[in-house]
Amino acid sequence: MQPSIRTFLTGLLMAGALVTAAGAQRGSNLALMHDEIARRTAVVMPKVVAWRRDIHEHPELSGDEVRTSALVAAHLRTLGMEVTTGVGGHGVVGLLRGGRPGPVVALRADMDALPVEELVDLPFKSKVRATYNGQQVGVMHACGHDNHVAMLMGAAEVLAGMKATLPGTVKFIFQPAEEGAPNGEGGAAPMIRAGVLESPKVDAVFGLHVFPGALGSVGYRVGPLMAASNSFTLTVRGRQTHGAAPWAGVDPIVVGSQIVMGLQTIISRQVDITSVPAIVTVGAINGGIRSNIISDSVVMIGTIRTFDATQRQQIFANMKRTAEQIAFASGATAAFVVDSGYPVTVNDTALTTQMLPTIRWAAGNAGAVVRPLVTGAEDFSYFQEKVPGVFVMLGVTPTGQNPATVAANHSPYFFADEAALPNGVRVMVALAADFLAAGGRNAPAAGTAGR
């Protein structure tokens, strides 16, 4: 063998050995970091449980998260973070700068509760009442956001304890009004307009939601996960008359009933749902005030859930046509109005693939599972429109109960087993720490994957 060839091959072997050694070292460092995350998570869990119970007992409606945001801000300040309050409403942002330079990663939790009277018998059961849409209502964390806040507060404490070794910066985003503020807009969009993803610019964002599922399991999905959500209003106008002489007017209640039935054919007969599902639901019908008066108008409100932009526009057009033409046939008129809604929650393909080993580690024996499409909606989707993001689901169904039959989110009987919370803290901490340790190098530019 010629000396030059021998030298070349020797160099290749040495380079391969160096790469192998470097890979082994990175694996060893990651294992040590995960051990530290597990240890620090175990230490902070009593606080997480206490925060969760306190927030659960004192829920606040969308746009009213004064007490919760103050609790969060005070905690972040004790950790030595740069804290900004009043971001996009009652939003709170904590900035943790690591001991070494690197990417910027964001972790998000939502803080608001729902106008639901709690029927779960707990020592820390909510007894709060408030005014919603002009009515006195009970207030409950029926969607589980109390768990989200407490877990992210715990994650903040864990990561703050690891600050010196973090190669980058972590932004903790505590968001108000995910369920929609009184003006109809969720809290993510105002926070983005206020610059939450800038100064420093965020490279990736991660979020989590509790959900019926095997206790402690972490659900994920590449690409679309949760549906786009649009609210609609349909106003049917007839002509008021005496209930004993319906021929003297135009009855909008009868016309409205025909429209409701007509809308059901849009999904079942007019839209190709073989690739992704879609839903049209009429949630309320209001019209008339007396038994012997045919009213002048009827107002219907409802929701539309989709996973595809083209399909969504087709449904809008079909709903408008169906309502208008059914009304016209009876001598009435119909006006269809749809809001801008929430976009589809789309997990970035490359980032989800990159972080899958992290998700599996954090889920432990409970397991990382692929979630089916979820027809619920999330305004975390607005963050994902700006930067690569991954949203995961934490199973909180008590052991021995069937996730398919327990009370779901938004029910007055919704219950989250606190035994799942350690996995939630671990996954949020590890997603941030592992992304920073990897230098964020595999994260694509926003909008280039998973769309």
Image (cartoon, rainbow, N blue to C red):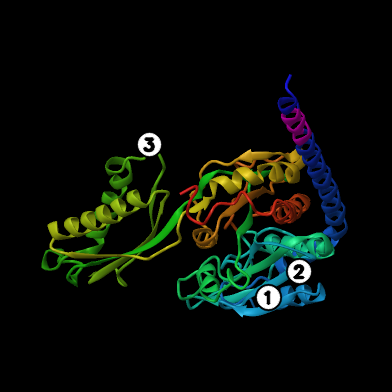
Is residue 295 visible to us here? Answer: no
Residue indicated by mark 3: 274
Say what secondary structure mark 2 lies in: helix
Report which quarter residue 432 is drawn in.
bottom right
Front residue of 19 and 93:
19
Residue lying at 81% horizontally and 38% vertically, measured from the top left: 21
* 421 on left or right of 248: right
Q: Amino acid at mark 1?
A: Ser
Start and end of the magenta stretch? 7-16
- Magenta span has 391? no
Residue 155 or residue 296, whichever sits in front: 155
| Vertical placement of residue 23 versus 320, above or below | above
Q: Is residue 217 left or right of residue 14?
A: left
Residue 270's x, y, as percent?
A: 27, 43
Instruction: Give the x, y percent position of residue 296.
Output: 22, 72
Q: Quadrant of residue 130?
A: bottom right
Label 3 crowd bin: few (<14), some (14–19), many (20+), radius 10 Å: few
Which of the marked residues, 1 or 3, is nearer the chain's N terminus? Answer: 1
Q: Residue at x 46, y 76 (%)?
A: 183
Tell whether 38 sits left or right of 118. Answer: right
Give percent across and percent down for residue 181. 51, 73
**Mark 2–mark 3 distance (CA, rounded to whole Å):** 45 Å
Q: Amino acid at mark 2?
A: Asp
Q: Which mark is residue 54?
A: 2
The residue to which callout 1 is attached is 69
